[in-house]
Image: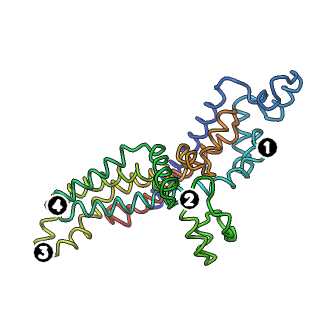
Amino acid sequence: MIHAICSRLLGSLVAVFGASIIAFLFLRVLPGNPARLVVGPLASEEALQAQMQRMGLHLSLPEQYWRYMSDFILGDWGFSYGAGQPVLVQFGNRLPASIELGFYSFLFAFLFAVILALVATYRRRPVVDATVRAISVFGMGMPPFWLALILLVVFNEALGIFPGPGLRLSRSIEPPPEITGFITFDALVAGDFRAFANAFHYLFLPAVALGMLPFGYLVRLLRANLLDITNEPFILVVRSKGIGPWRTFTRHALPNAFIPTLTASGMIFAQLLGGSVLVEKVFNWPGIGSLVVDSILRKDFAVVQAFIIVSAVIYVLVNAVVDMLYGVIDPRIRN
């Protein structure tokens, strides 16, 4: 067990290190001088050189990388010259909104995928199964940004059921005391259910738009796995022991079919936590996606590098949790 944990930890560190190397080198081979973007096109050569000294661009690439990673580990993620503030401050302001949106998007996709996959495969009724497959195809074939626009036009502009873009909480609602930056969680901790309901109201449309694509993929994957497992001989053996169909389905078929779905869910969850640029743009969501796009355009190295490293860490952590859940679902693979 200890060997497996050490092996996974080593692999995780290698993955994060590789992501940081690729991000560092890729950004620096792009044309243009980021120091010139800071001082402006009319600045003198002396001013340009002085700015390069301040940004550390006069050092060799290995020295620049060592300095950046050393500072990053110590909590200094660099300075965003485009925004005029430390990168860590920017991430502290923006990342909670993206993580909260990603969490509810995944929750929507995962819960409805499991429910519809069970409905489609338990009784094997052709009409129900065809309906579930049609819904999954719709979800997979719907571009998230286009669905976001349609949801806004229908439910905000036409029907007025849901609020428009730009806010996480109504201005008339007093924000809950900030603990994590996740408004819904902070509201629940504070017992402010009015703020929770209002924040969830703002989250609903972007969460559906962002979660529809992974929903379609997960429901098709779990449905196919359940159909394969229910045709296995061991299911017939279980039924021959007098165990009812529902218990056979939930206690024996579902756990075995859930392993591939769990792997895909972990990757999707990690991806959603990193935010979605297009959906965040449509809803003017104050997340990390738009910040990264703007930083790429102005060659703000520190912001982009921090985003890539944080994303790699999120992937690593989520996959570590998924590995531990394997043993919970299937005791045969605990070792």
**5 vs 309, nearest the viewer:** 309
Answer with mark 3 or mark 1, whichever residue precedes in sequence. 1
> Tag 4, which secondary structure?
loop
> Tag 1, which secondary structure?
loop
Q: Residues within 10 Å of mark 3 (few under 14, many from 20)?
A: few
Answer with mark 3 or mark 2, whichever residue precedes in sequence. 2
Residue 150 at least partly seen: yes
Seen in the picture, residue 110 relative to 283 is either above or below; the reply is: below
Q: Are marks 2 and 1 in contact (CB under 8 Å)?
A: no
Does residue 212 appear to the left or right of 156 in the view shown?
left
Answer with mark 1 or mark 4, whichever residue precedes in sequence. 1
Answer with mark 4 or mark 3, whichever residue precedes in sequence. 4
Q: Give the label on residue 84, or none.
A: 1
Q: Which residue is mark 4?
A: 125
| Residue type beneath disc 1 | Gly
Q: Are marks 2 and 4 in contact (CB under 8 Å)?
A: no
Inter-mark Cα distance, 3 to 1: 70 Å
| Residue type beneath disc 4 | Arg
Inter-mark Cα distance, 3 to 2: 54 Å
Answer with mark 2 or mark 1, whichever residue precedes in sequence. 1
Inter-mark Cα distance, 2 to 1: 32 Å
**Residue at the left extreme?**
240
Q: Which residue is mark 3?
A: 241
